[in-house]
Image: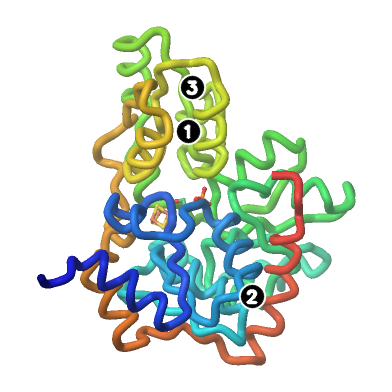
């Protein structure tokens, strides 16, 4: 009998000595074959701690690139090299260099949703799970450029009381979630708690009970006593939430919050990736070594 695609992926994964890491926004079937499903910080930590020589990274390019920065001796594969992130593309390193030139004394904190070149020009890297902690670890009087997500940056500023110098970057998927969506769902489900991702606009964040990374949302959903939750983030997270919490009800804040790049990875290209050992993600060593200093600080910032 012909083996199913998941059986073929599992067999080949064993043969290659590979692990499969998947982001929380991946398609349900991709999450289900992964060895680990998590947020950007969890995936980076998992990549760094893994003994496997090959990592198939089911997520967007900057995530695979970050794994490669952390693990230059491993082969990090992305099954579809076109799985980019528009926030990364709207923030070329030249813009950061201009900001640095205008503020020579400032420290740079870059969101992990950025290119390796941007990370190489940064002092610290952070994810949405530890952005507040990373900023709080920097001496109070220091000027900080926060690059490139203006919504995450303004959320961090509100939580830390620091005035951050922001760039005009944002996530085109999370800005589709509107305050009107949250208000309508709150009316329809008056008992529900509202969780949103800090990439949402400030008006949406202002309506939320909790603002968390995708990993933080999974943890909170498991631990809280609420049985109904309105989720202001990319809809892919609902698969994991429903699987882990069968007794609870989750409502997407907006069905329009779909990240097309995250959905480029499917079982066919995961299998192909293992067969062909493609596409290998590598960062030139001179850039990698400089970016690694900022990314190491991100991985080591424990409180999340
Ligand atoms: P998390 O790190 O919270 O999973 O977010 C990643 C991301 O790209 C959100 O759009
Ligand atoms: Fe980038 Fe937004 Fe997609 Fe996250 S959800 S990968 S920030 S476009």
Query: Where does the image place residue 6, in percent across and percent down from the top left?
Result: 26, 64
Do the residues bearing badges 3 and 1 touch, measured as CB atoms within 8 Å? yes
Determine the residue positioned at 46% across, 52% down. 170
Query: Where does the image place residue 196, in percent across and percent down from the top left?
Result: 48, 33
Tell me how far mark 2 sits from mark 3, CA to CA: 37 Å
Query: Where does the image place residue 222, in percent across and percent down from the top left?
Result: 52, 29
Tell me how far mark 1 sits from mark 2, CA to CA: 29 Å
Do the residues bearing badges 1 and 2 touch, measured as CB atoms within 8 Å? no
Tag of residue 207: 3
Tell me how far mark 3 sits from mark 1, CA to CA: 9 Å
Q: How many neighbours does mark 2 have within 10 angstroms: few (below 14), some (14-19), or many (20 or more)? A: many
Disc 2 marks which residue?
A: 70
Query: Which mark lies nearer to you, 2 or 3?
Result: 2
Q: Residue 83 versus residue 180: which sits nearer the camera?
A: 83
Query: Which mark lies nearer to you, 1 or 2?
Result: 2
Label 1: state its secondary structure: strand
What colour scheme governs how the chains and residues are painted in the rendered image of this protein? Answer: rainbow
Side of 172 relative to 92 (left or right): left
Q: How many neighbours does mark 1 have within 10 angstroms: few (below 14), some (14-19), or many (20 or more)? A: many
Query: Which mark lies nearer to you, 3 or 1?
Result: 1
Q: Is residue 44 above or below residue 160?
A: below
How many callouts does the rendering have?
A: 3
Query: Where does the image place residue 72, in percent across and percent down from the top left?
Result: 61, 85
Q: Is residue 33 visible?
A: yes
Side of 80 relative to 77 (left or right): left
Disc 1 marks which residue?
A: 196
């Amino acid at each position: 009998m012909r083996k199913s695609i998941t059986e073929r992926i599992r067999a080949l994964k064993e043969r290659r000595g590979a692990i499969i890491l998947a982001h929380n926004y991946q398609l349900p079937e991709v999450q289900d074959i992964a060895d680990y499903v998590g947020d950007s910080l969890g995936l980076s930590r998992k990549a760094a701690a893994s003994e496997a020589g090959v990592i198939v990274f089911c997520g967007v390019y900057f995530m695979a690139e970050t794994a490669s920065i952390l693990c230059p001796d491993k082969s990090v594969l992305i099954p579809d090299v076109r799985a980019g992130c528009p926030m990364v593309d709207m923030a070329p390193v030249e813009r950061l260099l201009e900001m640095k030139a205008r503020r020579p004394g400032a420290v740079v904190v870059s969101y992990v949703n950025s290119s390796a070149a941007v990370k190489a020009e940064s002092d610290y890297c952070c994810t949405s799970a530890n952005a507040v902690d990373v900023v709080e670890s920097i001496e109070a009087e220091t000027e900080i450029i926060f690059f490139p997500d203006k919504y995450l940056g303004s959320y961090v500023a509100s939580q830390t009381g620091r005035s951050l110098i922001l760039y005009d970057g944002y996530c085109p998927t999370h800005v589709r979630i509107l305050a009107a969506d949250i208000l309508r769902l709150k009316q329809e489900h008056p008992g529900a708690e509202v969780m949103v991702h800090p990439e949402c606009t400030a008006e949406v964040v202002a309506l939320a009970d909790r603002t968390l990374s995708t990993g933080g949302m999974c943890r909170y959903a498991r631990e809280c006593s609420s049985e109904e939750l309105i989720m202001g983030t990319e809809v892919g997270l609902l698969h994991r939430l429903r699987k882990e919490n069968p007794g609870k009800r989750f409502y997407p804040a907006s069905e329009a919050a779909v990240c097309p790049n995250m959905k480029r990875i499917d079982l066919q290209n995961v299998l192909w990736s293992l067969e062909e050992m493609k596409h290998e993600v590598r960062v030139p060593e001179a850039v990698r070594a400089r970016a690694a200093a900022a990314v190491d600080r991100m991985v080591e910032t424990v409180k999340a």
